[in-house]
Image: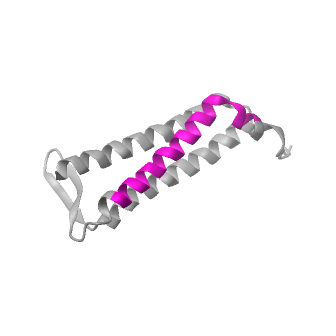
Amino acid sequence: MIKEFSHSRPLVNFWKDSRHRFLFLGSLALNLFLFFYIFFVFSKEEGLILLRYDLFSGVSVFGPWVRFLALALLGLLIFLVNSFLSSRFYENKEFRLSFVLLGASFLVQLILILHLLLIVFYQL
């Protein structure tokens, strides 16, 4: 049997749930912070900067600052996919899985910011 798609109630309840709202808005805010931090810190750089550092081999990749935007775009892609899937699971009354997906998105944003900050502090 084909399940009918309903726009009315489930997404309204999704936004009323404070845990889902916090994780969604928190992930969005962290991703926006990532974009702004990359733009304001690195946009003045004209030469090559450190893009990746490995504990075993040291500095492994240099490049222009624009390549850091791939980090933020990856975070945005993960955020969008997880948010979409989370809303679909919430509609199907899979509340825990919906919460886990949004939590994973939030955690990924934190890891990406930590990665960026470690690279910035290493360049000092």
48 left or right of 104 in image: left
- The residue drawn where x is 63% and y is 44% is 85
Between residue 103 and residue 27, name the one nearer to us.
27
Which image quadrant for residue 52?
bottom left
Between residue 29 and residue 72, name the one nearer to us.
29
Magenta-drawn segment = 13-40
Tell which residue pokes out farthest to the bottom in this image.
Answer: 46
Is residue 98 in view from this perspective?
no
- The residue drawn where x is 53% and y is 48% is 79
The answer to whether 119 is drawn above or below residue 49 in the figure is above
Is 30 within the magenta? yes
Secondary structure of the magenta portion, mostly?
A: helix
The answer to whether 124 is drawn above or below residue 17 in the figure is below
Q: Quadrant of the N terminus?
A: top right
Tell which residue pokes out farthest to the left in this image.
Answer: 57
Which image quadrant for residue 13?
top right
Q: Where is residue 104 in the image (x, y as percent from the top left)?
A: 50, 37
Q: Position of residue 122 (x, y in %)?
A: 18, 48
Is residue 117 in view from this perspective?
yes
